[in-house]
Amino acid sequence: MNLLRRRARAFTLLEVMVAIAILGIALLGLLSLQHQSMQSVIRAQQSTRASMLAQAVMTEAELERYPDLGVTSGNFEASFPGEFPDFRWERAVEASGTFPDVRVVKVLIRYGPTLSQNFALIEFLHSPIPPEEEQVQAAP
């Protein structure tokens, strides 16, 4: 009688294998979630860096006060040596079309291993010299 009670309490090999399979599937799902979480953190870090670098390029345009029309581009090696190898910038300055003393400055940051991701920043810069004074200075 004691022998029968022991067998009733023990797990069979099949039950142990099913439990291990369920545990393995659950751990695989958790590992996948961890990987997705790490990828999200990396994307967020790169996006934050791109926005910071775009603001740095825009600040340079603001320091020029009224930048010349045209497109310029480059990397961040001169400003931040070795820190941002996968980031490139492009700055396009255009006339606003509506107001002669306003320029549209567009900063585009390309980033990632293949430079396939983008971050754009657009700002309108007003000429510090009023339009009447520009005409007077151009006359002589």
Image (cartoon, rainbow, N blue to C red):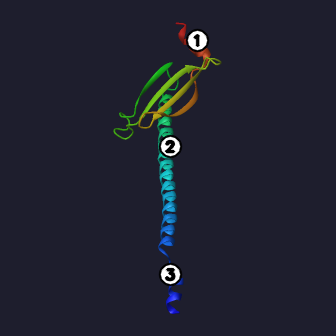
- Nearer-N-terminus badge (1/2): 2
Tag 3 residue: 10
Q: Based on the displayed image, in which of its 4 quarters is residue 126 positioned?
A: top right
Residue sticking out furthest to the left: 82
As measured in the structure, the alpha-carbon distance from the residue carrying label 1 to the one carrying label 3 is: 98 Å
Asked which quadrant contains residue 125, the reply is top right
Is 37 situated above or below 99? below
Count of number-bearing discs: 3
> Above or below — where is 123 with respect to 19?
above
x, y percent for residue 12: 49, 75
Q: Using the image as rendered, state which of residue 80 and residue 4 is in the foreground.
A: 4
Q: Nearer the viewer, residue 33 or 40?
A: 33
The three-letter amino acid code for the residue at tag 2 is Thr
Circle 3 Cα neighbour tier, 10 Å, few/some/many (<14 / 14–19 / ≥20) = few
Dot 3: element: loop
The residue under label 1 is 135
The circle drawn on residue 48 is 2
